[in-house]
Amino acid sequence: MPASVEASQLFIVTTSARGKITSHASTGTCATAGDTETTRVTKGGRDAAHSLSSEAACALVMQDTGRQLFSDTLEGELTIGASEASGEAGEALLADFDLAHLGDRHPLSLSGGQKQRLVIAAARATGRHIVILDEPTSGVDARHLASITSTLRRIADEGAAVIVVTHDGEFASACADQLITLTPMGAKHACEGDHQ
């Protein structure tokens, strides 16, 4: 039977260096490669992804953020999936991620950490009920790590399920409501308050 996580909780999925995780954005599940155990995201006891259309259910932030940048402006990136993120709303969102001063730059000219923050900002702008992030702290310095941590907490507090795949145990401990450690033998669910 798959484990279930309420959508209002932020949780972190950690993988070992040998682990591999597959996120199925359209179904709201995660599974380890070669394993049949899954974790299902629910909202109010109902499957979160199936209560919405598959396209509108999830926002995905990939580890290689350069593959997610399509516009020639930072604001354009925010409005691809969320037209309400233009103008003042877009400027405020860029300021939240310390990107407002870069508004005239092409997204692909940004540093790795800046690209990471831009794609997370674009995911937040969509208002999707499930946000899946793969290694969102790669290329990010300590100051911006705190910003990403608080942003993910805020997204979860607004009612979204935030699923993070990471090797960063310190980051996971700082912001996770629930930890699931994937091992070659399957998933191990940590009790609330347990840190792995």
Image (spheres, rainbow, N blue to C red):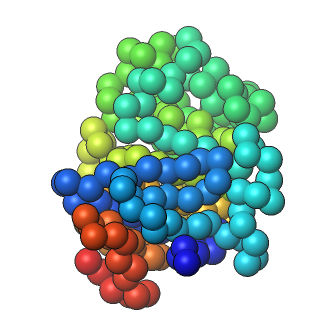
Where the C terminus falls, by quadrant? bottom left
Residue located 41% across and 47% down the image:
134
Where the N terminus falls, by quadrant? bottom right
Please state which of residues 4 and 173 is positioned toward the viewer in this rendering.
4
Query: Measured from the top left, where is residue 147 in percent x and y?
Result: 42, 53
In the image, residue 177 sits, relative to residue 169, either above or below, namely below
Q: Can the viewer see residue 154?
A: no
Left or right for 128, reference 98: right
Query: Measured from the top left, where is residue 92 in percent x and y?
Result: 63, 39
Please state which of residues 196 and 84 is positioned toward the viewer in this rendering.
196
For residue 49, what is the image quadrant? bottom right
Residue located 35% across and 47% down the image:
135
In the image, residue 173 sits, relative to residue 56, either above or below, namely below
Residue located 61% across and 57% down the image:
28
Residue located 50% across and 35% down the image:
119
Left or right for 85, reference 133: right
Query: Measured from the top left, where is residue 66 in percent x and y?
Result: 41, 24
For residue 88, what is the image quadrant? top right
In the image, residue 155 sits, relative to residue 181, either above or below, namely above
Q: How many marks?
A: 0
Q: Can the viewer see residue 82?
A: yes
Left or right for 18, reference 57: left
Query: Measured from the top left, where is residue 67 in percent x and y?
Result: 45, 24
